[in-house]
Amino acid sequence: MTSTSLNNTVPAFQSTPSYADIQSIVANDFEVMDKQVFGSLNSKVQLVMSVSKHVIDAGGKRMRPLITLLCARMFNDAPSEQAMHLAAITEMLHTATLVHDDVIDESGQRRGKPTANATWDNATAVLVGDYLIARAFNLLVGFQSLELLKLFSDGTCDIAEGEVLQLQHQHNPAATETDYLNIIDGKTSRLFMMATQGAAILQGQEQHLQALADFGQHFGNAFQIIDDVLDYSGDSELMGKNLGDDLSEGKPTLPTIKALELLKNSDKQDYEQLRIAVQTGKTPNAEQLIELVRSSGALDYCKQRALEETRLAQQALGTLPDNRYRQGLYQLTELASARLV
């Protein structure tokens, strides 16, 4: 995918690099951070350590801590133990939210590997998720920064509220795009914002907090919309879950919200079929329902919304220091968008 610059504020790149290419920009920092994610845990309870290791090892690409490391280097191109430590804490919080998500969704697998709740039980998974959050804040205190502690405490409240809001709208066919944006602002975008702004606070670059908040929010929005589109059009093996899982779980995602809106005005029978599936979670005809969403035009709309959010994230980078680390952030947005192709 070839990228284009926006108002000449961010340089254009000839092609989208791989995630490994972007990670290599801060390779040494990333290696230290990755070891700290588990190494910072010190529970005296062996079960806590075993479950924590299981969920951390099953983790994804560590995108959120990578963003923290890129931001820290963007402001000061030198190794920062504090930035690496904060990046590890960010990933610890992200892992905790995934553990809780799996319990709520009754998921047996994540990225093709057994979840903690499936390997042990719901109670164990929830309590270990709680421990990861508590330990993250225990480590945050060590920075002796009320500003940093406030950023993460406010953000963690927003994440929890986003999850509750999603639960509130579960199996609700009347959920709107505004409801959806409020949900993902909390459950997804807020942690992206914490990942960027935390680095700025560490480096004494508070004048850039708004630009970083805008980048984190819009990139987080784009990332979640893309994920939700792929639930109807992606590769189930690569995703580690079946297509249409969000529909059967009754999650209020943008593809179903938009499909219901479009079908209501064009095909009452198909609208009713999809509405009942969202409301009941009964999807014996999953393939037919997935095709309804695809043929409604909803995915095209969602892709455009994801690209709009991506452009806004890229524009937010325009006022930040222009160096290879800012390029790395830009390239992350391009890489995410390339998943839609």
Image (tube, rainbow, N blue to C red):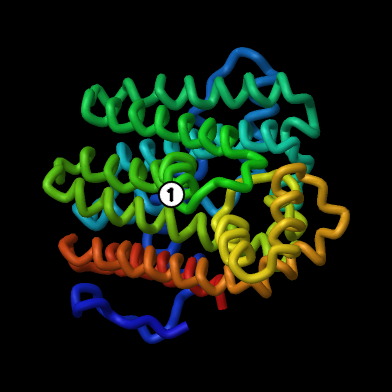
Q: Is residue 61 visible?
A: yes
Left or right of residue 319: residue 284: right
Q: Residue 103 sits in which quadrant?
A: top right
Q: Residue furthest left?
A: 207
Q: Give me the residue at 59% from left, 26% from top.
A: 129
Left or right of residue 73: residue 137: right
Q: Give me the residue at 67% from left, 41% from top.
A: 171
Q: Residue furthest top?
A: 44
**Above or below, comparing residue 136 to residue 97 in the picture:** above
**Above or below, comparing residue 322 to residue 227 in the picture:** below
Residues 176 and 28: in front is 176
Q: Residue furthest right?
A: 284
Q: Amino acid at mark 1?
A: Thr
Q: Position of residue 194 (x, y in %)?
A: 34, 41
**Above or below, comparing residue 8 to residue 205 in the picture:** below
SS of the residue under disc 1: helix
Q: Position of residue 98 (x, y in %)?
A: 60, 38
Q: Position of residue 232 (x, y in %)?
A: 68, 64
Q: Position of residue 131 (x, y in %)?
A: 55, 20
Q: Which residue is mark 1?
A: 178
Numbered-mark total: 1
Q: Quadrant of the C terminus?
A: bottom right
Q: Give me the residue at 87% from left, 54% from top.
A: 284
Q: Is residue 28 visible?
A: no
Residues 23 and 208: in front is 208
Crowding at dot 1, Cα within 10 Å, few <14 / some 14-19 / many 20+, comes out as few
Left or right of residue 55: residue 211: left
Q: Give me the residue at 27% from left, 44% from top.
A: 197
Residues 136 and 53: in front is 136
